[in-house]
Structures are given as structure tokens and as C-alpha cells.
Amino acid sequence: MTTIDSAPLPELASPQDSRPATSTVIGVDIGGTGIKAAPVDRRLGSFSEGRVRIPTPQPATPEAVATVVTELAAGFGGDGPLGVALPAVIRSGIVETAANIHTSWIGTDAVDLLQQATGRRVAVVNDADAAGMAEVRYGAGKDHHGLVLMVTLGTGIGTGLYIDGVLVPNTELGHLPLRGGGAERWAADSARGRDDLSWKQWSKRLQRYFRLVEQLIWPDLIIVGGGVSKKSEKFLPLIDLHTPIVPAQMHNDAGIVGAALFAPAD
């Protein structure tokens, strides 16, 4: 069994390094509407083949999702390892929560399930943790030392926390109490649409959320991801923090690339 708390990220060679390049591995990003996969060159942080997407089965039970992951992996050939990003808290391979997937995932040994289904070695990581790792390694957080926080704004708020590039898993700071409930209910991008908020109105909610986070952990950099990060010029300049806050750079590739970073060594 391979889990993220026992498997360090691979040491990657720089373009000038004479060591052999790290082998290409498959990254899989499981979402509420689609499951996406691609072979990833972990040295470059880019796809070595085109991305393939299959709709997430409904209901998204463990067995149904495992079937899709197996199909995606088989389509790329070979028998190499997989890194899989799942919208859930993962501890020692066990799923502790379920967001946009079926609640029957809770208590499932995701690593064992996917290894048995695919016949490959598998590591499973929280999806926000995976996306953030891609940004820290290749994107907006590259070469940035200290405490980096990745925040994805979408249906909910996902977070990933990194100290000098090392992941602190399963932070779930989108569930901090704010305005009488979980912060993501009030400040996620879904709340902007649901409550018909202007960018300025939404930015005021984000200001309160990010200020709360800043007061708790005082990061050195905040990276904002999720689909809405492509429109960061509409809201990020309106947020005033002590901490630098920047948009993500890898966008839809981050989950797949980040998942591949955690794949077990051959």
C-alpha cells in the first residue's frame, strides 16, 4: 500500500542535470462531473500525451469510479503506477469524507480498491493538495520558500498547505466557521452565482475569508486556483492582505499533474 504520508515526492532532475529523467507516470483527477487522466512527465510538469476525460458515473460509488479509472489507465497502455486525486480527506489510504462523490466512499481503502481494480501500484491524495503541489512545484509557487497556501474557489473551497514545498495534508480550511456556517457556503465561487453577487460584492466576502485564514496561519504566499482564477483581475486586486496573493498558473492541468507527483516509484 502506498499513501502520501509515507511516500516522499520524487527527486526531480533539472534540465541541466545529467541524471536520467524521472519516468512518465499517469495522473488521474476525479471530480464530481468528470474523471480526467494523462501521462505526466514529472520533471517538466507537463502532459506527455493528450488528456482524456470520461464523465463521472452517477452515482459515483467506489466500484463505479474504479471501473472508469481502470478504463482510463488501460487506454494509455503499460502497467506503470498511478497517482489519483480524490475530492476527499485521505488518511493512510482511507477515505474520511466525500465531496461530490458517493458517501459510500467514506471508510473505503481507496488505495487497495484502485490497486485491485487496475493491477497497478497506486497512491491517492486529496484533490486540493494535489493541485497545490503542482503549483508549488511548477506554477505560481515555484521556488517560493516558507509557508504557501493554495486555495481553490469553486463549488466549495479547497485548500492545500506547504512548508518549503512539503505538503501538510488535509487542511480543509474551506470549512472554517464564518457567518454562522462553513466558510465555503458563504464565500465559494458557487455563492457568487447563487446570491447574484457582483465581483466587488464577492470580493468583500473573500476579504473576510482570507483575512481569517491569514490571522490563523500567516502564510508567506496565497495562490488562488479554481476555474474562476482565470478571471482573477476582476477580484484579486480588490483584496487587501498582509500576504501576497496571486492567481494559479496551471489551471485545469494542476489536479492531474499534482496527482502524478504522488504516484509510487516503479
Image (spheres, helix red, strand yellow):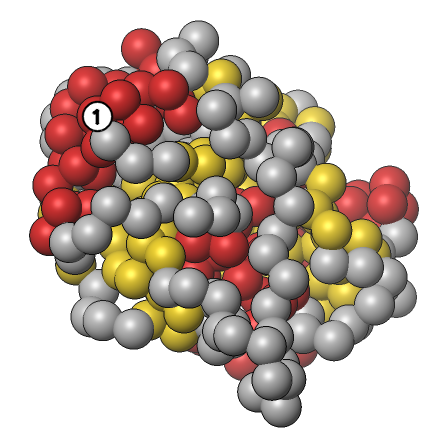
Identity of the residue drawn at 77% across and 65% down = 221
Q: Position of residue 59 (x, y in %)?
A: 16, 22
Q: Residue furthest front?
A: 19
Q: Residue 92: which quarter of the image?
A: top right
Seen from the viewer's position, the closer of residues 61 and 234 is: 61
Amino acid at circle 1: Ala
The residue sitting at 86% across, 61% down in the picture is 146
Residue at the extreme bottom: 16
How many numbered marks are there? Answer: 1
- In the drawing, does residue 184 fall left or right of residue 171? left
Question: In terms of image quadrants, where is residue 174?
Answer: top right
Q: Nearer the viewer, residue 159 or 74?
A: 74
Q: Residue at x 36, y 45 (%)?
A: 81
Q: Position of residue 27 (x, y in %)?
A: 35, 52
Q: Is residue 194 above or below residue 227?
A: above
Direction from residue 72 to residue 45 in the image, left or right: right
- In front here: 14 or 130? 14
Q: Position of residue 25 (x, y in %)?
A: 36, 57
Q: Is residue 174 something one can see in this rendering?
A: no
Q: Which residue is mark 1?
A: 117
* Residue 234, x across and y down, in percent: 52, 76
- Local packing at callout 1 (Cα closer than 10 Å; few below 14, some 14-19, many 20+) is some
| Residue displayed at 46% across by 19% down | 95
